[in-house]
Amino acid sequence: MTFFKTVALGAAMALSAAGVQAQERVKMATIAPGSSAYLTMTTFASLVNQSQDAYEISVDSTGAATKHVIELAQGKLDFAMSAPTIHFFLKKQKAMYKKLDNAAVLAGKIRLVMWFPYGQYHMVAYADSGIETLDDLKGKKVFLGPPGGGAWNAAYSWVKATTGLDAKAGDYQSVKASWSSALQGFQDRQYDVYISGGIAPYPVIEQLALTSKIRLLGIDKAAWEANETAQKYISALPGREIGVIARGTYGDNVEMAHDIYTNSATVGIVTRADLPDDEVYQITRAFWENVDTARATTPWLSNITLEYAVREGGMPLHPGAQRYYEEIGLAIPEGSRAN
C-alpha cells in the first residue's frame, strides 16, 4: 500500500472512530457567468452547502447545457441545467441531437428538481452607437450567445421573427465567444450588440450601466400583438414565453423607449433518475428552506417560486424532489409528477 493510500485510509478510519461523517461530493454543471441560469444555480449550490453538512455541491461553469444533460444521463454529473425545449429535442432526437441514436433513452434517465425562469432576453447596444431598434442590427456585429447553445438559437430565432434579419444569410455577423469573453468584448466595444437572458433587474445590465450609457432594444406591446411570426415562435415549443422588461426597471443610464416585449424561457435544475431519493430530497429541502433569507438581499430571487418550480415542462420530477414538495402541501400538476 502506498503512503498516500495509507494516509487516506487512516484518515477515514479516524473520522469513523470519531463518529464524523465526511461530506459527499456532488457534481453540478451550469453555463458560464453571464446569465441568470448561472446566478440561480450557483446560488442554489451556495445555499445548500451553507445549510447542511451531508453534501457539498461543486459547480463547474464551463460548457453548454445541451452537452451537460448528456453527461448527466451518462452518470458523469449529478445535477445540471436543462430546459423544456432541450428535453423535448432530446426525447424526439431533433435539432442538436438528431444524430444521437440513443437520445430518447438518455432523456429517460433525467428527472426534474425545479424549474425557474431564465429571464427576459436583454438586447443591448451603447446609447451613442446609433442603434435604436432591432432592425438596426443589419450589418452589425452581434453576440447571440455561445454558438451551438440553446441561448444562441433562441436569440437568433427571435431576431429573425421580429425583424426578418438572418445571421445565417449574412444580414449581420454572429460573434463567436463564450459568455464571459463576450461580456468583456462588449465592454471593450469590440462589437455592437450584446444579447443575454436574465431576470430583470438583471445584474449584468446593471454592471454595464455603471460605466456607460446603454440602450435596450426590442419591440413594444403593439408590435408583439401584431406579429404572428413572433407569436408562433413562442408557442411552437414547450418552455418558450414572452417576457416584458418594464420601462424604468433600470436607472437613467439604461435608455428604453417603451416597455420591451422580448422572448423569455423556462429552464431548470435536473438530476439523474438513479440518484438516491433521500439525497435529492435533502438537497431540495435545503435550498427552499433557506431561499427566503437570501431574497432579502437578492431582488431577482423573488422570481424563483415553488409554484413555478413544479409547473409542467415535459419532464417528471425526481421522487426525492416530489417528496419535499408534497410534504409542504404544494399542488403538483399531473404532467410533472414522478413516474
Image (spheres, rainbow, N blue to C red):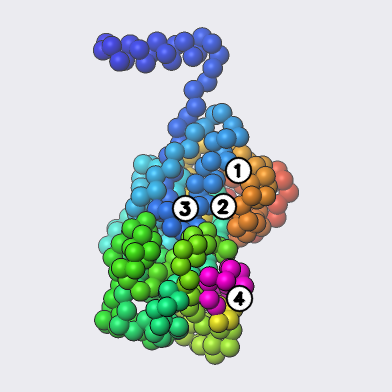
Determine whether 229 is above or below 22 in the image: below
Secondary structure under badge 4? loop
Magenta highlight on residue 252: yes
The x, y position of residue 72, in whole percent, is: 40, 47
Mark 4 to mark 2: distance in Å?
A: 30 Å
For disc 3, the marked residue is: 38
Place of residue 49 in the rendered image (x, y in percent of width and height, measured from the top left): 54, 36
> Which residue type does callout 3 highlight?
Tyr
Q: Residue 114, labelled with which disc?
A: 2
The residue tagged 1 is 287
The amino acid marked with disc number 4 is: Arg
Which label lies toward us, 1 or 3? 3
Q: Within 10 angstroms of label 3, few (less than 14), some, or many (20 or more) residues?
A: many
Q: Looking at the magenta stretch, what is its main secondary structure?
A: loop
Q: Viewer-nearest of labels 4 and 2? A: 4
Name the disc covering residue 17, or none: none
The kind of residue tagged 2 is: Met
Instruction: Pinpoint residue 91: horizontal percent, then vertical percent.
Output: 41, 61
Name the quadrant containing residue 151. Answer: bottom left
Q: Which residue has dot 4 on it?
A: 247
Q: Earlier in the sequence, mark 4 or mark 2?
A: 2
Q: Are marks 1 and 2 in contact (CB under 8 Å)?
A: yes
